[in-house]
Amino acid sequence: MKSLVKKFASNEDGAFATIFGVSSFAIALSVGLAVDYSQLSAARSLVNVSLDAAVLAAGHELLDGNENSASLRKIFENQLYANLESHSHLANAVEIKDFSVDVKSGLVNATLETPVQMAFMGLLGYQKVPVASFSEAKFSTTPVEISMVLDVTGSMNDNGKLPALKNAATKAIDILLPSGKTNNSVKIGLVPYSEGVRVSKKMADTASGQKNFTCMTERKVNAFNDSSYSTEEVGADPQAGCSFSKVQPLSGNGASLKGDINSLTASGYTAGHLGISWGYYMLSEKWQSLWGANAADNYGTSTKKVVILMTDGEFNTYFQGVSGNPTGAQQAKSEDAAKALCTDMKKSKKGGNGITIYSIAFNAPNSAKQVLENCASDSTPTTNYFFDANSPAELELAFKEIATSIKSLRLTQ
């Protein structure tokens, strides 16, 4: 008997087999759970990315003037399923639990639920695990008024600069006023400038009292602010030789604006401060009577006012009070006037925001870059307001980034 007990006590074969079996099952289960967790994480990531893109697509469409809920949902669904097209198991499983658009608050949001098939958790009774996803996009619903202050001086005829400007500005119009869309909340005006700013005879007569001279120059007293022409008329110096390209008032007609851009011609020296002046006048409530039906909104409203300022050269021309050569020889006066005007534009208006200024130096000398950087609104970690473009591709990218920034669509959750 003692011998039998001793043999039993010394025999470990069965105990080892049981322990090994239990351990192997635990290890396999742990590996399986890890695989399932990895699968869940990958599915969640794919669905979330696709959902964000689909919500943004609907939001962009809303920004472009589409306020039809059914149409926006269709755009959302098309984008969502297109994003998941290469992952058919997710595309077939995803369920849209909610999709909503609130035009007044500027929110687009959606909730999805995606049952993900489990490989190992089925052993524990979980054949599928639901993955919940939520995304919300907030966008600016406020009206936007933009004056594009564009250099059309003689140097823009060199090295393909003028065609590059036309291409870049046209593509910005396409972003802000997409073809085939009706968007009453975005209006854009054009202020081409060289030695001065050319306006129509009627506008020249109203603003300067001299309808025979349509190339506008400085005022004597209110040269650095937006005081109305009824307070002091603008100058119309007969020495100024503007480009033939005229100011085009605020408009929501993208096709017409692109036609005006493609018709720009370049000549003359650079009175950049005068371009800035008229970019200011275009957005000012004090000049509404000059622009008539195309006038800007009042200050202090929700309307966002923006100037896009572009040049390829130093500001070097000034007429008022100059006894010597006004063209190409008055750099300090023109630069100082430009800085003073930009400072006044950016000041708070009626307790609200001032005018936002984006500026672009295009193959410009350092003196011009310094003026434009001084003029631009202060950049933030997420938004640039000054751009130094040194090629047509960089100029196009600058206009594209500015146009996209103005639309100000961003994910909030």
Image (cartoon, rainbow, N blue to C red):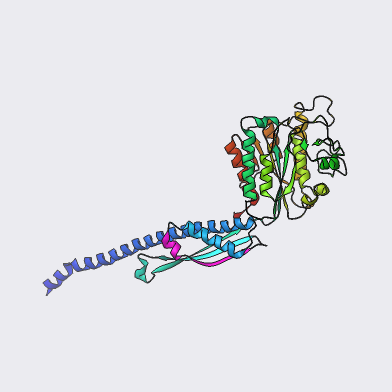
Please say whether residue 12 is one of the residues in the magenta stretch.
no
- Answer with left or right where residue 152 lies relative to residue 75: right
- Residue 123 position by quadrant: bottom left
Is 220 on the left or on the right of 64, as rendered? right
> Quadrant of the image for the C terminus?
bottom right
Residue 101: horizontal and vertical position, in percent?
Answer: 61, 63
In the image, is residue 30 above or below residue 163? below
Q: Pick the residue in front: 211 or 165.
A: 211
Q: Position of residue 405 (x, y in %)?
A: 63, 48
Q: Find residue 365 and report its horizontal and vertical position in percent.
A: 66, 30
- In which quadrant of the rendered image does the N terminus lie? bottom left
Residue in the foreground of this view, choosing between 72 and 405:
72
Q: Residue placed at 52% from the left, 62% from the top?
A: 77
Q: Is residue 347 visible?
A: no
Question: Image quarter for residue 362?
Answer: top right
Q: Position of residue 208 (x, y in %)?
A: 85, 39
Residue at horizontal 16 percent and vertical 71 percent from the top: 8
Which residues, given as a range, are shown in magenta?
A: 87-105
Instruction: Confirm whether the magenta stretch covers residue 95.
Output: yes
Q: Is residue 279 visible?
A: yes
